[in-house]
Image (cartoon, coloured by chain):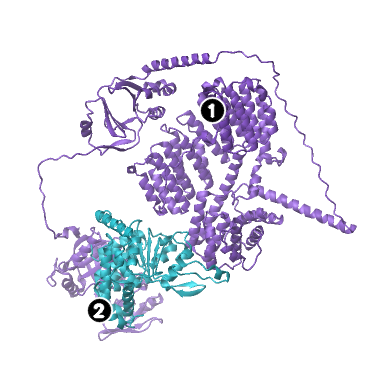
Amino acid sequence: MRIGVRLSGEATDVAALAILADALPRLVEEPWTAWLPELEGASLVAHPALDLEGARRLVARGLPMVGFAAEGEGLRLVALSSEGEDLRWSRVRRREAPTLAEALRPARLAGDPLCDEALFVMRPDSVEPRELLRRLLLLERGDALICELHVQAPVSAGGRGGGLLDALRARFGRGGASAATGPEGSIELFAVKVRAPPLYLLMRARDGGAADEVEVYARDGQSALWVAWGHAHPLAGAAAAQLARSGQMALVDRQGNWLRGPVEWRTRSIYDALLPELDARREVLHVEPGERRFRITLRLAAGPLADPELWLLDPDQLLALEPLIASASGDELGRLTIARLSDGRRARYLLRERVRPGVPRLGARISESLEVAGFARVAGADNLYLPVGRRLSPMLRRDDLRRLLGLDEAHTVIVAEDRDGPQIITAPAVDEAPLQRWIDYVATDRRLALDELLERSVFEFPEATIEWPEIERSAPQRPPPRERRPRARPERPQPIAEDPTEAEEAAPQVDDEGARLRALRAEAREIERALAVGGVDDPDPWARLGAIRLDLGELDEATPCLEVALLHRGAPPEIDYAGRLADAHLALIHRERGPDLLMELVVTDRPTAGESAALGALLIERMAAGAPPSDEVMQIALPLFADPRLPVPRRLAWSVLAAWYGHSHDRLGITRAKEAILGGLNERGLSELHDLPRFVRHALALEPAEDDEAAGAGERAQQSQLVALEALWREAEAAGLPELDAHANFTRLIFAVGFARLGARASANEIIARIDEEVDVHEAPNRALFRLYMARLAHESSGGSEETWAAEVGKQLDAVRGDKPRKAVAWLQRRSLWLRTAADEGPRRRPTYGLPEHLDPAELAEHLAREMAPESGNFDYVIADAVDACLGRALASGSEALIGEVLEVAERGLEVIDILGHRAEAVGACIRAAGSLGDDALVGRLLDQLIEIARSPRLGTVHELVAAVQRGLVALRRFGGLEPARGLVDALARVDTYTAAGTIELLSTVAIGLVQLGEEGLAEEIVDTLISRTVDGTFDYVSRCQAGLAVAGALRHWPNLPRIERCTRILRGIAVFRDTFTTNRYYETHKIMILEAIVDSLADAQTRQSDRIQGFLDLEEHALRRRIIADWSALCGP
Amino acid sequence: MWTLDELEPEIDEIRRRILQHRRELKEYFVGRDEQVDLAVLCAVAQEPLLLVGPPGTAKSDLVVKFTQSLGLGDGDYFEYMLTKFTEPSEILGPIDISLLKEGRYVRRVQGMLPSCRVAFLDEIFKSNSAILNTLLTILNERKFYQDGQPTPVRLMMLFAATNDIPDQSELEAMADRFVIKVETRPVKDTHFAELIDAGIQNEAYRASGRRPWARSTAALDDFLKLGRFMELIFGLSSEPGADRQRWFPRPVFAEMRRIVRALESEDKVMVSDRKLVKLYKLIRISAFLEHGGAVEPRDLRLLAYVGNRRDELAVVAHKVHALLGLG
């Protein structure tokens, strides 16, 4: 009996053979004999050197060693290990192999494995190559290669190798037996090599047909060992190493037969093996001599916006140049030329800007000033001008254009357009002169007109001297400050006790109860102070505050606290909180618990906010108690909480939704709910009405300094404002308010209105007491204005409506006799902060873009891409509005994927918006969306764009930029992006825009942003710098006034103390706010405007309070977002 | 319910009528032959069909005309556009409040999805989980729950449309129920003039209230009879594999296996066990409908519609056509 190793054809063979190779390394390279039964996979390999003793040692190492002996055509196997069993293989095939690796049969792999590379071997003259190549081409796999490889069977086995080759020749040779032959003992095979072969082709080759004409070999990596596909060689590593040593490759078939060949084969592309044919009729076209030309009508179409540089003016329009000339610098005027032309009927003026590289263009300013759009030069044609934003369509070759428009014969050609269509205006010659040469003539002309006007004025109003009796010029006396007398505490009614002993016992109880309540209130105030900062997501203090409020019987104060506690406790809901909350809500709507209560609330048609909240609390309570309502009930109830338009507190709504979907493990449900709630938050934020606990409003009404007991605890902002205004009034008085002086009276009236706004009507009346007496001595416009201010004072005290005020203004203006005085009154009335009406403020810019009504949110990105495409022809402001509208709709969907998609399109298309102001608007909208996604990288990129826009000399007005910055800051605060927000304001604080007015507006916005972010130190620095530059005369007089107004506006957001200090500084410098308006004969417009602005700023408590409340809501919203994401992730995964 | 003996004598005539009906219906559309073929096939097999495509590609029009052509009676057809705010009551019928107060959750289903025979749900993937879960039960088990009790539904044919198939794992189960998903693409680039002519003709039909497609050759019963016939044929022999051995030649079956494996392995197209069985059934019915005999390689073209996500649909179609050598 001989000794051998029984192999199963499974993965365990790999380990067994590794042990064998390790135990008997020298035998690996020696000849072995294999017995292959018909049973696929199993085999037996034996070497003459294997003996019983050695086999026992190998058995001990876990090798399946067997003894075997031939039995007829079969083999009998005796297991040498105790676990093995004896076997009999009825028919076996014997094969000699030169090495162990070549004796082994590859193991079948499970399934249909993919491989790196496959070799399809087939008969070249069969149908298979054609089919294979056709399918490869259909699958777009033209990278496959045709190979011709010569292989030979092992020579050491005598005639055995020849037999194998004969079989191969019969199978794969050309024409069957007449096989392609190579060198002696070898055969040339036709094969197709395919990288990452399609599984379909591998399976098709394996499944084969009746002829079985394709064999597939596969390999992974760059191994020289190709094994029949679907099989793996159990000693692949050793076999590959052996082949590498011999510099050969080998094909190993399913039975383990080896065919060796050289590593390098001759290959060619499969296209080289194709003989393509197309079964089609043929038709040949020939060149037809001759040339035909076609008439194409040119038209003016929407084109890119460019700065105008040429204006064709009528004589009337020419006069409109005056304000521009007055404000332009000498250098700027030096760049303008003018020429007088005539069309035979009237004079026309050609104004041209000589464009210099690197110098800011004047075009936009000139067009704005003249209210004439102007013409822009066509790129590539020096003397052709088209209306701004238009181009000639279709595009022609330059030479054709020159010929058509006669550009070579003319000095200037303008293609204008009006209602009748395009018009070609040609100027064959132009006598241009610098505009500066014309200025003297124009100016002289106007001065003469002015002199005439003055003469007439003198004639109409003869000089008169009016003598007035001496009036005591002392300032009005302030009443002495009222002493604060401690209010006598009313005597507590004594309990009437029949039994003196009982009375003695009851009194300490009352005291104890009182002390307990006092302690509770003190504790509540302490917790409130901590919670009023916003964003506290620790449920414990909220729960404690809710409990205290319940204890104090303040149910409406308790419910929001318990709702927040419930929200932040997370799933599953806390039964205790939920129970208390339900009790409180039910008590608030005067309902009692009962078996039908839940159902009644569920089916209530149009529930009130209280009923909705009670239902939410009851639902959470049921879920917390482990007795959730049925699916049907929830199907009716849930829409109430998932619809952000309904008046349900957002926190409670999410608690209900999260609890239910968490309970039902409904991932789609919670995803939809998340989108609904986040969409609502994105669109509206938290509601001051439903989501702001009442105590926050009270807590935030105290300024931090005022909150300090040393500074007078309990003092509210309005009282301290009154004190501050009084201080400012004293300052104004000290500077001198002479009698019979119009400006002094305006000052008194402005302060009086301020006092009235703060409810100090008595102080107001006292201040203006003398004005009534002296009003008649003032000029008519001032008299009317005094009366208007007094009317305003009454209006402030009575809290009248806008309509009432407009009617009052109309009445007063009508009462002024004469056009000129009326105009003088109207001049200030329209500019004054307090005297103007809503109609004087002018209409606000409305969005110019509306989304299609039924646009599917999923198509927003595609829609926006179309709107932003250059070929859409949309103006920049339309694109900016489209970006805003699309992002707004995406945000309202609450779907982060959708927001991201639309945002990506918007960001990519920002460059399309050429006008920087509008681009800034679009960037602002993008920042809002990016903030909602928490995409810091994108936010950073967008903020960089804003900063770049601010620095650009191409930025015209900063209004849009400022709006974008404000919007970005609001969004970043809401979405928790405080760091990027700080980064933005910090960067913008160092930006000087192209104009002083722009810098002022931007810096004041930045200062407000900093205050709202709590960076008050830096904000004060900016405002102080602005005030210094304002009062020291750095700016021109218009910018100076703008700066003063901007600073006063910004100061509204400041705490009281620094606000007073800075208002006082402006007041002290009021003298610098001069103006050159013609009305300063009566009053000084800028001084009045500045005075109004600082008094109004000082008397404004609302802005600061709103800022703080909004700050709280922002932080709360951010906390709610975090909670929503956490709950959603807990169910759906991160 | 019809028996095989009743159906056998007239089945060829039914087949002819259905094919004629299909040809007639195609005349009212431009470039929608593929979708009409699949609608007819799914109607016979009583399998849901999902039409995927951008707005304005005749998805609704196709389903509406097809259902009108079936000569349905009152209450047999239900159509609804779903949104994320659609409540189950809008599809399944409102809960009877008077019964609800007695503690019974009973829906009034008259004229709603559970009581109709053919339904069209537009924007199906926008609905919320309550609706999707109910739809899954209806599609799987042909029943829904009234007051906790399973109640059979009459629904036989469900057509659904969507602009997109969201890539959300929560929606996979519903997407998998639609074995066949077909894209509807704009045809204006290839059929510019025909599209306008047909569109204007449709406007004229609408204005005059005429519905010539409703005068069709086949009726709903024909579709139901053919479906029933195929069910009886499938159950003819109790021996496993008998239907396959008789009607699905081995090489064609091997081809189907290869294509399915290739789609799964190379294109990661998920073909669930349930879907594979349904595919077999659809291919068999398609073969019978088209040529009345055993499955041929060309019948495997149905595999082109097994993609699950929108981006897969075109890839799968291209690949299946290439593998089948259909160009």
**What residue is shown with label 2?**
A94
What's the chain of the residue with tag 2?
A
Residue A915 percent across, percent down from the top left:
40, 36
Q: Is residue A147 left or right of residue A233?
A: left
Establish if A1127 lies above or below A335. below
**What residue is shown with label 1?**
A826
Label 2, label 1: how far apart the Cα atoms are: 119 Å
Q: Are marks 2 and 1 in contact (CB under 8 Å)?
A: no
For chain B, give the colour.
Answer: cyan
Establish if A962 lies above or below A976. above
Q: Nearer the observer, disc 2 or disc 1? A: 1
Establish if A384 lies above or below A286. above
Quadrant of res A880: top left
The kind of residue on which mark 2 rests is Arg
Could you tell me which secondary element the residue under label 1 belongs to?
Answer: helix
Establish if A836 lies above or below A466. below
Residue A973 percent across, percent down from the top left:
53, 45
Q: Which chain is purple in the rendering?
A: A
Front one among A780 and A933 = A780
Front one among A634 and A1043 = A634
Which of the two labelled residues, at mark 2 and mark 1, occupies the earlier sequence position? 2
Is residue A20 shown to the viewer in this render? Answer: no
Position of the N terminus of chain A by quadrant: bottom left
The kind of residue on which mark 1 rests is Ala
Residue A555 percent across, percent down from the top left:
67, 55
Residue A141 percent across, percent down from the top left:
24, 59
The crowd level at tag 1 (other Cα within 10 Å; few <14, some 14-19, many 20+) is: some
What's the chain of the residue with tag 1?
A
